[in-house]
Amino acid sequence: MLEQFQIPEDIAVRVPEGDMRATVEAVFKQCGMPAEHARQSADVLLYADLRGYDTHGVSNMLRVYVDFFEKGKINPTPAWKVTRERKATATIDSDTAHGGVIGPEGMRLAIAKARDCGVGVVNIYNGGHYGAAAYTAAMALEHDMIGVSMTVGGLEMTPTFGAGKLVGLNPIAIAAPANKEAPFVFDASMSGVAGNKIRIANRLGRGTLPAWISEADGTPIMDEAPIPEGFMHLPLGGTREIGSHKGYGLAMMIEVLGSVLSGAAAGPDRRVFQSQQMIAYDIDAFTDLKLFKSDMDTYLAALRNATPAPGHDRVMYPGLNAHEVEQDRRKNGIPYHPEVLEWFAKICGEQGIPSWLPKP
């Protein structure tokens, strides 16, 4: 993780996973969620925190979800339904369900369809933020499948050469199993930096790095600078000269597959807040499973053992760092900024929610 987003060790408070999980479940139950849904939604957030996806963990997202519940933007007891279905595909109207509930439901359905057809594709619309895309993609791993998960996010990005928030940040995640190596798990926004990372930088009193965001008029910020009012996210690449048209095009691709294909339109004309697409590939339908995992091990080990460039200690691949971070955080606790624990103390105290967290 870049220094820009790291909580300094001298102020970080390490919290055992179980204590945070129990507290988050209690908060979700207070919001009206059934116990099963509260456990599922907490699991999505704790997955992010354990693997170092702090942008999509408890620190940023739980307070947003609580606010959405209070404003009626999330239905705590949804009656989601399949509105269109064929043997390998389905579309789900989630009835404004919490994304941490309906996202995993959609991937479970995709996995079941892949088991029958080799591939399962499920679109979800009329729902909300579903947490780290890696969570649902990685659900396929235990079934010896490749998982793909993409979501059409908030309109916070300006198109290349543009000066308006017309494109979603639109993350995509892909997870593929290996044998001995840590699985390949890629999860990234199609913007130069994830939206929540700007929130973390603000919390830590830090600014933006070059090619992440633009001024309010669309001018790319190409130097380290404070985060300005009215900024917009830039597509991955930052400017046309260094490839922003690629990030912009990929973001549009996800909008088409996740939103337009769900019947929810796209961009500022979207008829719903967010929508997603889940894909599961049954590896055995394409090639020998043992051969695939062996080949993945060979490929990932070659990358992991590659000669590092000057000034760098090692070469990594997507999923390796998160795997190592998870081992540390399960053992030593998850580091949180004191401000996050202050928020928990406030909301738990005001609403009489049980808390297992240390006093801020």
Image (cartoon, helix red, strand yellow):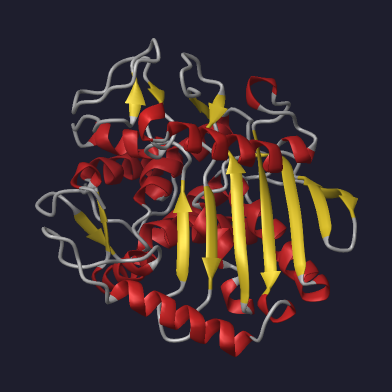
Seen from the viewer's position, the closer of residues 23 and 50 is 50
Q: Determine the residue located farthest toward the front in the rendered image.
A: 241
Question: Eyeballing the image, is 22 above or below 253?
Answer: below
Q: Residue shown at 62%/50% (left/top)?
A: 33
> Does 39 sit left or right of 103 as displayed?
left
Q: Residue shown at 51%/49% (left/top)?
A: 131
Seen from the viewer's position, the closer of residues 210 and 321 is 210
Is residue 113 shown to the viewer in this render?
yes
> Does 240 sit left or right of 140 as displayed?
left
Is residue 239 shown to the viewer in this render?
no
Q: Residue shown at 36%/70% (left/top)?
A: 323
Expressed as whole percent of the image width and height from the top left, the position of residue 277 reads: 68, 49
Q: Determine the residue located farthest toward the bottom in the rendered image.
A: 290
Toward which corner of the image does residue 53 lie, by quadrant? bottom left
> Does 310 sit left or right of 45 as displayed?
left
Expressed as whole percent of the image width and height from the top left, the position of residue 43 reads: 51, 61
Q: Residue shown at 75%/66% (left/top)?
A: 119
Expressed as whole percent of the image width and height from the top left, the position of residue 24 reads: 45, 54
Question: Eyeballing the image, is 270 above or below 199?
Answer: above
Question: Eyeballing the image, is 268 above or below 9?
Answer: above
Expressed as whole percent of the image width and height from the top left, the position of residue 152 reads: 60, 38
> Does 151 sit left or right of 304 as displayed?
right
